Image (cartoon, helix red, strand yellow):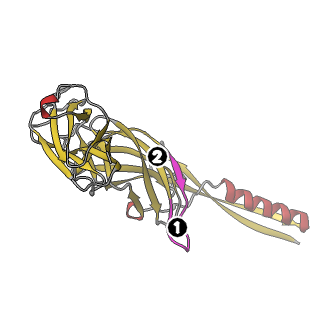
Amino acid sequence: MNTNIVIAIKDCRNNMGKSKTIYSSVYIIKTSGIMNRILAGVLIILAILISGCVSTVNPVDPEDVIVNAGTITMKEFQEMEISVNILNNGTEPIDSVKATSFDPFTVVSSGMLNIPARTKEGPSSTSINVKIQAPGFKTDTLNSAMVISYASGKNEDGESVSKTKSVPLQTIVLPDAKLQYVGFVKGLANLSEAEVTTMEIGKGQNATITFSVKNNGKTTIDKKSLNVLVDIENKEIGSNSSITIGEGMAKGGTSYTEGVVLPINKDAPNGETDVIVTLYMGTNVIDSRTIHLKVKL
């Protein structure tokens, strides 16, 4: 017995790069016998495969891409590699994930990876390494924002859809300043003499610590914007003292050599302790040096 099989083929074609036009064709195949019916089935499958129609898949919404890098603290114009954690809370994977910009910082390079869709346990996450360069420390970084790009879903051409996510990040940029000539001298009248980093002292005597500050960056550091704290680690031996740097420093500039006197307790235990000299801007540490004090028996 002969059987007529009707095959309808939809041909999805691009119209000169514009919107798609769908063409439909209908074929009638006469079959007889088991072999012919098998052949007809194969033709039907081929018709589906070559029709060219692709179902679209919605890309992951940027709201479902969660980015975190913590607080980024660095000195002006220096480069640093940071780790950026990215979570995909969408029901589709996101591919070719990378950092494309980070205003007002500069993205020097970025890793790129794929992140699977969320699972029953929660969002899928991973981290990428991004090398960045800081701007000058007087640049307004209050609105620092990193842009993450990714590909997800499919459009009518079967191609992945490019999306971006902009996320604010907390940043701190500090001057490129350093402590120099840190050590002990005999007294405030001897600040110009060579300093030593280890000193032996008697109970009830005074320890004089000397230092200066140098601006290795490109931006002028305003006067009275930096502070130095000199701290005896063992508080049974002595305490601490701080000083404000009174000089402004342009590129390559230095402060005057300063001196801080720390009294050693009369009942101090004998032995060794660290003396930590720390350079601050506000509450942020810029540089720190450690020297060593030994109290005699």
Point out the residue furthest to the front here: 297
Q: On the image, which quarter does residue 103 sit in?
A: top left
Sooner in the amino-acid sequence: mark 2 or mark 1: 1
Callout 1, which amino acid? Answer: Arg
Horizontally, is 210 left or right of 102 in the view? left
Q: Indicate whether 153 appears above or below 176.
A: below
Q: Where does the image place residue 212, in percent across and percent down from the top left?
A: 20, 33
Horizontally, is 267 left or right of 39 in the view? left
Out of 212 and 284, give the one closest to the viewer.
212
Q: Residue beneath label 2, please?
A: 129
Alpha carbons under labels 2 and 1: distance apart: 22 Å
Residue 161 seen from this side: no
Secondary structure beneath dot 1 equals loop
Instruction: Give residue 118's mark.
Output: 1
Callout 2, which amino acid? Answer: Asn
Region of the chain picked out in magenta, as a range: 112-125
